[in-house]
Structure formats: structure tokens, C-alpha cells
Image (tube, coloured by chain):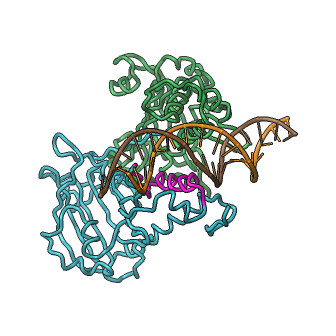
Chain colours: A cyan, B green, C orange, D brown
DNA sequence: TAGTGGTCTAGACCACACT
DNA sequence: GTGTGGTCTAGACCACTAT
């Protein structure tokens, strides 16, 4: 057997070391979403492993949701999907079907100083300027979610040049197209609070009614924070279900 | 190669059919939590498979959280743990550490007719009698969660004989000990509402303050519903976090 | 037809737990 | 020491995709 070409802790199994290596290549951006990886035989050959060992490493990454394998086509770096976002538990379905993206109405977009808690999340200096946006998401003409979005000025300066009319209902593709920033993952936190005056008016509910609050911090491949947003919707529209085994 | 001894859809791979078979044995109660399975070699032999194939089936069940494997000891049916319950996102930690089970104060226990929505969940006839219990969970002397619990009269009649003082802070072990009912899994649903008069008084918050509501339907191995409970706590103590990849 | 991943086999060797 | 699961190898054959 040839010498192992994998670095890392020698006590770890080979398939682990290979998985870590590939994970890092993806994190660092050396491999981007949609890229095809070499076949398992090629990978195995390259690192002096048996195909089964390479296969096990790939299986682990598939399990982590980082890779996707399609029989006959190859192994691909998975594009992040927000299918599991807490957001989808707001029960907006346009009458009948489900699944659609709610329409957005942009209420404002401007450059102003970050609130301290946002600056901290985005790893920006306190009191420095950022881009703030406020949107209302609407289904069948009824407001369902109010969003406050913050971006660092760099690298999102080009985002300010885009006409509001050209912003669709999804922002992440715009970040990619105009600023070459790709959201790779995110953390979400769910809390609840009583509706304040402004939120109540915009969401068309009574002051003091409970609302669900979802804070999301979106990150790039390198883990660098890209966007912070807070989404608020009436609690009566929210319904989150999990399984315990 | 010997004939396959596995039933099921012949188009499915062998490891899938074996996994399905074992899953059913566990669901039906033929194998109970804590039971040790035969070694992978024995299983492989029994069904005329290669060890690697049996291994893959077992790996799948480990991934599903149904089995647990310990090197040198064997493969075991996993006991359900409520580590992932939404419940743990109520931020009660006794000063300092975390992790403890909050103390319970039983407020009442009696036999009365199910509310319709509870009867439906527990698959009992509407208007029939059930066991109702109300508890307050307490940390450091402060009330944190109010619970309403419903059980079907059968098979829980023996539960009524137990002295309140003998009920600890955890109920599921009691169900097992006195009624031979084991909770195998559960579904939880999270919503929020404004505190009513009673809840506010018991939880020591203002009327109208938002509270988080977790409904849980616990089931036995056969999927039969065993217990329904609704837990309510102040939203300000609740903080739920997820990762999106 | 060539190349990919998916299934399955049949072993060798190691680390760990019991007793 | 014996038996368990964990790692790793080296292949065969199949199903699917692209050309």
C-alpha cells in the first residue's frame, strides 16, 4: 500500500481525514456550489485509498448536506436551500396550494449606522455605517411578515446601485449577481414578543398581540457573516412542528 | 449465493429490506429499548447476506436514531431521549450550570371528560372520561412552565392509585413502572399566544404577555397515542436556535 | 459505448469490552 | 482470550447518464 497522502491527525480514520479535507476545500471556496467533484475512483487513486474508503467519506458529506450524488452524473457541491428555514412555518399559503415565495414590498433602503447588536453580529465596528432595508412580505394582498435587513457596506456597496424595481422577491440571488457574495449557510433564532405600535399597524393586528420573531445571520463559505435580518409575523400564523424519536 | 430470506419489494436493495425488517421488529415491540441485537456477522449469516450488507442496514438505523452501536459491546435498541424536545429551549437553568430537570408541583389530578380536541388526538371517543393533571414546573422557586396533561383511562387506571408524593419530576418512568406503557416517540408543535388570566397568575407575569405553547403527543412503540400535554411558559424565557446549511 | 454512482461480496486487521 | 464493532481493501456487477 502506498503512503497516505492525507494530512491531519494520524489517529483519525482515513475516510475522516478525506472528508475533512474536502469539507475545507468547499468552505474555503476552492469548490463552489454546483461544481462536480472527481469520481470516487479518481479521488481514491489520487490519495492512495481504496474506492470504498473514498466512498465512505463522500457518503458522510452527503449526509451533512454538503454534497449531492446523482447516479450516472457525478458528485456535486450542493447549493444551500432554505427549505428548512423557520420562516416556512409561517402559514402563508396562497389559497389552495403552498410553497410559493410571498411577494415583497420594499419600504425603505438607506445607509445608516448599525445598531450595536447588529454591528456585533456582522463583525463590523460599532457606530459604523451599514445598509438597512425594510420589507413587508405579502400574500393575497395581506401583510404576513415584516423584515428588517442589514448588510455591511463592503462588499455590498454595489447593491445600493440596483433600482428597487429590479429587486425581486428573493435577495440572495441578487447578492450573488451584483456583489459576488454567496450565502452558504445561516443560523436562525426564534423568539416571541408583543407587537409594538409600528409592527401592529404594518401587520394589521392589535398592539400587544403576540408575534413570532426569527433572527437570521447568513454566512458565506468562509463563515464570514454577510447579512443579518429580523422577520416578524403574527404568532397566530405560526405553527412549528418537530418529531422526537 | 444462497436465496435471499428477506421479503418485501424485490426491487429494493437488500440492505434496505433488512433495515425495514428490523425497523418493524422494533416498532412492533418484538425488540425493546436496551435490547441487544445479534452481531452483524450473525445477522448476515441468518439472512444469507455479506457482513458489509448487514452493516449498511445497521448504519442506516443508527442514522435514524433507532439503534446505538458500541464498539466491543454490541448493537442496542436506543432508548428515546427527549434531548431534542422544544421544551429544553425554555431557558431555565438553575444559577450556574444547566441541564437539570425542573421541580414539579402537581396542582391537581382527576378524572373528567376529555375536551374534544384532546379526545381526537388520543383516539378516544368524544365526551369519554380521561385522566387530567396540572403541574407547575419550578426553578429556584420561580414558576417557569405550566403543564396540562391528559391520559386515556385505559391503560392508565393504575396511575390513579399512585400517591402524589410518589410522583417524581419525570412521568414517563412512572408510566412504564405502573402501567407498562413506554413512550417511544413524540410529536411537538410550537405556537405562541397571549397569557390569559390564570396562566398569568400562575406564571407570575402580566395578562396579555406573550407565552410560548408546546403541544406534545407521545406515542408507544406501535404508534398508539399515550399522552397529550400542553406546556406554557413566558416567551421571554424561550430561545430556539437552528442551523441552516 | 464509456463513465458515473449504487449495490453487494469476502475478506484482513484493529480497538475495545467483558470476564 | 474471545467476541464485538470500526476501518480498510479489492474487487464484481448493476442502473443510469451522456455522447
Residue A180, x across and y down, in percent: 31, 74
Q: Nearer the viewer, residue B94 or B67?
A: B67
Left or right? Give the position of A217 relative to D8: left
Left or right? Give the position of B60 relative to C13: left
Left or right? Give the position of A141 relative to A137: left
Viewport quadrant of the N terminus of chain A: bottom right
**Span highlighted in magenta in the image:** A49-71
Q: Residue at x 38, y 39 (%)?
A: B198
Count of numbered badges drawn on the protein = 0
Up-down: is A135 above or below B217? below
Q: Quadrant of residue B44?
A: top right
Q: Residue at x 31, y 82 (%)?
A: A129
Residue B173, x across and y down, in percent: 61, 31
Q: From this viewpoint, is residue A128 visible?
A: yes
Q: Is residue B208 magenta?
A: no
Residue A239, x across and y down, in percent: 32, 44
Amino acid at each position: 500500500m502506498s503512503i497516505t497522502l492525507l494530512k491531519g491527525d494520524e489517529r483519525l480514520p482515513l475516510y475522516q481525514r478525506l472528508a475533512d479535507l474536502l469539507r475545507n476545500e468547499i468552505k474555503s471556496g476552492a469548490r463552489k456550489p454546483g461544481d462536480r467533484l472527481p469520481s470516487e475512483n479518481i479521488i481514491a487513486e489520487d490519495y492512495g485509498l481504496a474506492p470504498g474508503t473514498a466512498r465512505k467519506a463522500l457518503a458522510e458529506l452527503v449526509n451533512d448536506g454538503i454534497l449531492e450524488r446523482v447516479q450516472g452524473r457525478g458528485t456535486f457541491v450542493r447549493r444551500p436551500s432554505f427549505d428548512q428555514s423557520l420562516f416556512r412555518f409561517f402559514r402563508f399559503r396562497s389559497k389552495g396550494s403552498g410553497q410559493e415565495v410571498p411577494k415583497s414590498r420594499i419600504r425603505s433602503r438607506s445607509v445608516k449606522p448599525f445598531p450595536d447588536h447588529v454591528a456585533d453580529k456582522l463583525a463590523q465596528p460599532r457606530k459604523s455605517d451599514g445598509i438597512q432595508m425594510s420589507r413587508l412580505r405579502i400574500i393575497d394582498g395581506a401583510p404576513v411578515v415584516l423584515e428588517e435587513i442589514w448588510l455591511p457596506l463592503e462588499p455590498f456597496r454595489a447593491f445600493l446601485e440596483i433600482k428597487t424595481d429590479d429587486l425581486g422577491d428573493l435577495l440572495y440571488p441578487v447578492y450573488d449577481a451584483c456583489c459576488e457574495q454567496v450565502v452558504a449557510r445561516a443560523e436562525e433564532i426564534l423568539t416571541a414578543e408583543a407587537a409594538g405600535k409600528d409592527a401592529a399597524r404594518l401587520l394589521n393586528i392589535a398592539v400587544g398581540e403576540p408575534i413570532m420573531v426569527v433572527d437570521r445571520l447568513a454566512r458565506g463559505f468562509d463563515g464570514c457573516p454577510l447579512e443579518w435580518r429580523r422577520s416578524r409575523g403574527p404568532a397566530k400564523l405560526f405553527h412549528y412542528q418537530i418529531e422526537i424519536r
